[in-house]
Image (cartoon, rainbow, N blue to C red):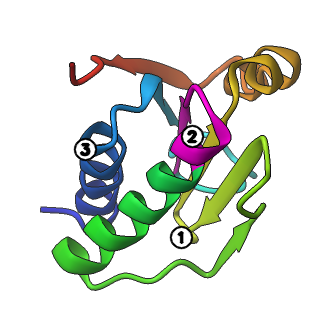
Amino acid sequence: MDQTKSLVEAVVRGLQEKKGKKTVKVDLSLLTGAICEYMIVCEGSSLTQLSSLTDSVWEVVRRDTGEKPLSIDGGRNSTWIGIDYGTVIVHIFMPEQRAFYNIETLWADSVITEISDNE
């Protein structure tokens, strides 16, 4: 399996383990000049959950793929956390910030896939 797709799947597993909501995969792989191949966007209901989602993504990706993020932006009290894996960028938001920035729709030519919540 392609390394980037394995990374995407591990990110999604990490988000689902901590009950991330409204997760979408934005496929930018066919767009010239895109900043990455995939963006994964998700939201949590509290700052504590955002922190847990971030930790879970880090742990699952490390365990399943051996990858470490290039950087993580946002901290324990942030309402938007970004995790950069190079080919995959993960955005974890509080609902209000996600609605305000609406980043998953910035690339109109991308393919957006909704991922079911893991109840």
> Which residue type carries mark 2?
Leu
Mark 3 → mark 1, Cα distance in angstroms: 19 Å
The C terminus is located in which quarter?
top left
| Residue named by callout 1 | 85
**Which circle's residue, 3 or 1, is located before the other in the chain?**
3
Residue 19, image x, y percentages: 34, 32
Dot 3 falls on a residue whose secondary structure is: helix
Quadrant location of residue 100? Answer: top right
Q: Which residues are magenta?
A: 38-50
**Which circle's residue, 2 or 1, is located before the other in the chain?**
2
Mark 2 → mark 1, Cα distance in angstroms: 14 Å
Residue 21, image x, y percentages: 44, 22
In this picture, is 7 found above or below 114? below
Q: Is residue 114 visible?
A: yes
Q: Are marks 2 and 1 in contact (CB under 8 Å)?
A: no
> Which residue type carries mark 1?
Tyr
> Which residue type carries mark 3?
Glu
Q: Residue 30 shows which numbered tag?
A: none
Q: Which residue is at a point 61% across and 42% down the rendered structure image?
A: 92
Residue 45, image x, y percentages: 58, 25
Is 48 contained in the magenta span?
Answer: yes
In this picture, is 21 found above or below 91? above
| Residue named by callout 2 | 28
| Residue named by callout 3 | 17
Badge nearest the viewer, 3 or 1: 3
**Which circle's residue, 3 or 2, is located before the other in the chain?**
3
Viewer-closest of 112 and 24: 24
Dot 2 falls on a residue whose secondary structure is: loop
Dot 1 falls on a residue whose secondary structure is: loop
Badge nearest the viewer, 2 or 1: 1
Q: Which residue is at a point 76% across and 44% down the rendered structure image?
A: 80
